[in-house]
Image (cartoon, rainbow, N blue to C red):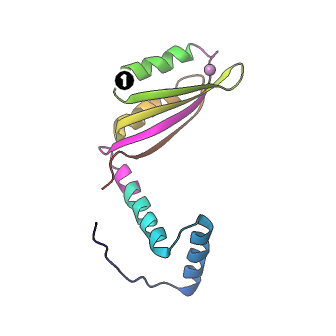
Amino acid sequence: MEKIVRFGVSLEPDLLKKFDKLIRKKGYASRSEAIRDLIREETVKQSLENENEDIVGTLTIVYDHDASNVTNKLLDVQHLHHKNSLSTMHVHLDAHNCLEVIVVSGKGKDVRSIADRITSIKGVKHGKLVVTKKRFD
Ligand code: NI
């Protein structure tokens, strides 16, 4: 089992009250668990800023499949970067609009550049990339 280190935290009573309220709302069993998650969140955020970090994520897009050749353009980008585009889920939202979730992986800079290329295709109405680390220590 991994060694655990204890340390003390000093903070203003009002701030602690707010923190306790927040962690109750979120359902944490203890302050320690909440602080651990906050530290992890910040360290993950930090390493995701490194463009050479290995990341994995999802790009969610909504597009109008009647727009100028959009389906082919989307497929072209994904085939061109097939090592970074792992899988796609497609949902027909209505007669014209499609929702697609593309699982992407690779170096941060490559994943972001592919996501930008896809999102900027004419006919893509909205695109949102969500990423996380591929490996956790
Ligand atoms: Ni569709």
Which span is picked out in magenta?
Answer: 45-68
- Under circle 1, the secondary element is loop
Q: Is residue 51 magenta?
A: yes
Q: Nearer the viewer, residue 31 or 125?
A: 31
* Left-right relation of 55 to 32: left
Q: Which residue is mark 1?
A: 82
Q: Is residue 116 magenta?
A: no
Q: Nearer the viewer, residue 5 or 63?
A: 5
* Left-right relation of 80 to 75: left
Residue occupying the point 49% across, 69% down: 34
In this view of the protein, can residue 120 be seen by the observer?
A: no
Q: Quadrant of ligand 1?
A: top right
Position of residue 112 measured from the top left corner of the image (x, y, whole percent) = 41, 37
89, above or below 72, in the image = below
Position of residue 108 measured from the top left corner of the image (x, y, whole percent) = 36, 41
Residue occupying the point 60% across, 71% down: 24
7, above or below 29, in the image = below
Position of residue 95 measured from the top left corner of the image (x, y, whole percent) = 72, 19
